[in-house]
Amino acid sequence: MSGPLVSLLIFFFVLVIGLMMLVAPMTMIFHGASWQMIVALIGGSIFFAIPFQALKDGKIDGPLIGISLVCLVLALQGWAFALDVPSESDALRAAGRAMGEMVVKSP
C-alpha cells in the first residue's frame, strides 16, 4: 500500500507527533511536568522508534497502524493540554483587572 494518500498520512503523523516532541519539554519547563506531557513524549519516542521506520519503508500492517494511531492520540492529548495551559500574561492581566476593580470600588 503506497501512494499520495499514504504519504500525506505519514506526513501528518510526523508533523503532529514531531512538533509535540519539541513542545512538550518546553511546556514542562515553564509549567511543570504533567502526565499529559510525559505520555506525549513517550508516545512520540515509540512512534519514531518503531512504526515510523516501517511506514517509511512501506511495510504497513494492522498492528503498526494501531500503534501509530495510539501515538497520534497521545500527541493530540499533549497538544490539547499545551494549548489549555494559561500563560503568565493571562494571569497578569487577570490580576491587573482585579486590582483595577478594587481601586474603583474603594471609597
Image (cartoon, rainbow, N blue to C red):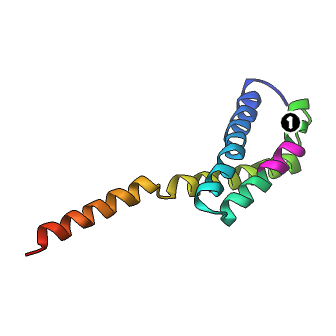
78 or 60: nearer the viewer: 78
65 or 92: nearer the viewer: 92
Q: Is residue 49 magenta?
A: yes
Q: Within the image, what quadrant is residue 91 found in?
A: bottom left
Write down the residue under mark 1: 55
Residue drawn at 88 percent across, 51 percent down: 63
Q: Which residues are magenta?
A: 44-50
Q: Within the image, what quadrant is residue 6 found in?
A: top right
Residue drawn at 72 percent across, 45 percent down: 21
The relative height of residue 73 versus residue 53 in the rendered view (above or below) is below
48 or 9: nearer the viewer: 48
Horizontal arrangement in the rendering, residue 17 relative to residue 106 (left or right): right
Residue drawn at 69 percent across, 53 percent down: 73
Instruction: Give the percent coordinates (x, y) of residue 18.
Output: 72, 40
Q: Main secondary structure of the magenta part?
A: helix
Residue drawn at 57 percent across, 54 percent down: 82
The relative height of residue 69 versus residue 103 in the rendered view (above or below) is above
